[in-house]
Amino acid sequence: MRSLVPFGLLYLVACESDKSLTVQNPAPTADIISHDDGDEILEGFVITLRGLVSDSNHSSEELTTSWEINGEYVCEDVIPDADGETSCEVVFTPDDTEIKLLVVDGEGKGLGERRSSE
């Protein structure tokens, strides 16, 4: 004679396992699109730095960007446009050699993109 196991019992056994759910917040991305490493920049002129930022789980409006030159903020809390583009107008001095674009999402996760100039 065959014995049948009720489906309800199998269902309860399957529910006994311990599963945990981990919510992940990937870091946003940042890319400086106006200048490349080693570009020469004229001092004393207004230069527009441009960057492109994105995040897989946040819209552009939920991102905040900041620009640094040699570790000093020159533009802070800039909200990128709908396409993720951000910009900052600066005047360089001969000592300015490093540009950095920082981006932070609405949950505080961030990333930076660094470029050096000559």
Image: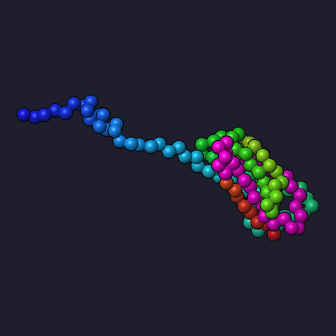
For image coordinates 81% across by 69% down, the residue present is 118
Give the residue drawn at x 76%, y 66%: 116
58 with respect to 93 (left or right): left
> Horizontal and vertical percent for residue 88?
82, 51
Examine the structure image and report whether residue 97 is included in the region drawn in magenta.
yes
Image position of 44 (left or right of 67): right
Q: Is residue 39 left or right of residue 42?
A: left
Percent from the top left, x then y, of residue 4? 16, 32
Q: How many dots with numbers?
A: 0
Residue most extreme to the right = 44
Residue 46 visible in image: yes
Give the percent coordinates (x, y) of residue 2.
10, 34
Start-end of magenta stretch: 85-110
* Residue 97 image position (x, y, % from top left): 81, 66
The residue under the point 7% across, 34% down is: 1
How are the residues colored? rainbow
Near-viewer residue (107 or 48): 107
